[in-house]
Image (spheres, grey):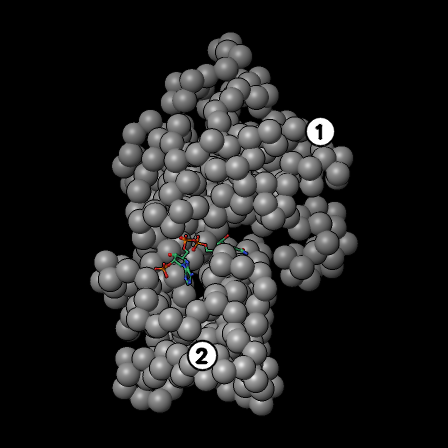
Amino acid sequence: MSAVKEIYELGETIELGAVPEKMHAFLVRQDRFGEPRDAWKREVIPTPKIGPKDVLVYVMASGINYNNVWAALGYPVDVIADRQKKGEPEDFHAGGSDCSGIVWKVGDQVGDWKVGDEVVVHSGWWEPDDPWVLSGKDPMLAPSTRIWGYQTNYGSYCQFSRAQSHQLKSKPKHLTWEQSGCYMLCASTAYRMLMGWQPNIIEKNDVVLVWGAAGGLGSLALQITRACGGRAIAVISDEEKRQFCLDHGAVGVINRKDFNHWGQMPNTNSPEYGPWIKGARSFGKAIWEILGERVNPRIVFEHPGESTLPTSGFICDTGGMIVICAGTTGYNITMDLRYHWMMQKRFQGSHLSNDDQAAAVNQLIIEKKVDPCLSETYSFDQIGHAHQLMHENKHPYGNMACLVNATEKNQGAR
Ligand SMILES: NC(=O)c1ccc[n+]([C@@H]2O[C@H](COP(=O)([O-])OP(=O)(O)OC[C@H]3O[C@@H](n4cnc5c(N)ncnc54)[C@H](OP(=O)(O)O)[C@@H]3O)[C@@H](O)[C@H]2O)c1
């Protein structure tokens, strides 16, 4: 191997497996918590060392996800302080929870991947010796579980990222670096929400209501629903997103701007309750009109939270499930409990995915049953800008990516 330089510029030729001492990375620091465009900055930091079950990935492209909007804001969690409390020394957050790249170095105990393999990375991270994980139970419920690139450092906005070997899946060969780098976090989360909570998983013809259907999670939820035999109803706020949803598996689309009963549910004894329940009923009727029959959603795919949950709880079918992975519009949720217990509905929290669920959805992508829905690709130096767009809900449909070591778009597909 020829001499390894101390640092390489992005895209500069590096011999396969050669690890420089330093690397370029996009970081957040505590003294610049705030608007993502200012919080994320490019810096040079030491290349991370890997443990026996880890891999070092030469990152080609990375996805942009909402979690690193939260990391930039330092809200609701200061991820840097949180890690320092656990004994980690770094005073920065080198984030990024979606990645396509090349395996560059493997730990002593890694047998399933080798240097040169082309991979994508899912962001479920846990201590390898966690007794819960070793017992064979769902690792996403283990005490040590964290979100890679959000709750762990050295994620995919780094030239070289550190991951655990179980997080790797094969890169779909037909996709470019940016297409394959943009989907895994949202795809695996959506898959667990829709197929991970027995017995409330999609069965043939089941109706699934998908909030934010043209967004990162939503665009994948539509397609997973179609691939699993269900009927997805998409919710949007802008008519320009309608056709996109129909093209990606929705059987019909509702524009939430046609209703105005959003936000926390009023007290059931107050005069405001009447107009609220009227709004919720007319939203339910809009679903029946699309379907041409009086059928309610068996699964409600939730993430806006505070603003939409009262409606989700009301329109969900008897014995159905409202499954939720976020509270983008607020955490103080309300719901009319009478409909919840009488109709025996389920309210299920869901977070990211385990290895099996990530593998299952990756297979749907490999089989071209689900498309990553890449909308825009940005350069490495536009990482802050892309997070700002997401923060302001001004980003286009689907998922965004940024190039890291890939120097141009449209590379990496075979
Ligand atoms: N726990 C997990 O594992 C996990 C994983 C992935 C994402 N998430 C979280 O899930 C959320 C969505 O992520 P994403 O990547 O899909 O984001 P995204 O691409 O920004 O999509 C969010 C969608 O929400 C909709 N929305 C915005 N304001 C709304 C409101 N007031 N009422 C109803 N819908 C509204 C928007 O669609 P319209 O304006 O067209 O309705 C938007 O397309 C984020 O909070 C993210 O952190 C959690």
Tag 1: Cα neighbours inside 10 Å, few (<14), some, or many (≥20)? few
Instruction: Say which of 68 and 136 sits in front.
Output: 68
- Report x, y in % for residue 342: 58, 90
Q: Distance between the Cα atoms at labels 2 and 1?
A: 50 Å
In the rendered image, the residue lying farthest to the front is 271
For the C terminus, give its image quadrant.
top left
The amino acid beneath tag 2 is: Trp
Whichever of callouts 2 and 1 sits on the residue coming sooner in the sequence is: 1
Q: Nearer the viewer, residue 372 or 259?
A: 259
**Of 280 and 241, which appears nearest the observer?**
280
Q: What residue is rendered at 66% in x and 28% in y?
A: 90
Query: Horizontally, is 5 left or right of 251 in the view?
Result: right
- Residue 159, relative to residue 62: is it above or below? above
The quarter of the image that holds ligand 1 is bottom left
Q: In the displayed structure, does residue 296 sit left or right of residue 175?
A: right
Query: Is label 2 in contact with label 1 (beta carbons under 8 Å)?
Result: no
Q: Is residue 155 left or right of residue 90?
A: left
Q: Is disc 2 surrounded by few (<14), some (14 to 19) or many (20+) residues within 10 Å?
A: many
Q: Is mark 2 within 8 Å of ligand 1?
A: no
Residue topped by disc 2: 276
* Residue behind label 1 places its C-beta within 8 angstroms of ligand 1: no
Q: Which of 234 and 334 is in front in this view?
A: 334
- Give the SS element for disc 2: helix
The kind of residue tagged 1 is Pro
Name the spot of residue 335 as percent of width and height, x first.
56, 76
Judging by the rendered image, the residue that carries numbered circle 1 is 89
Residue beneath the point at 41% across and 40% down: 388
Residue 252, position in %: x, y?
28, 73
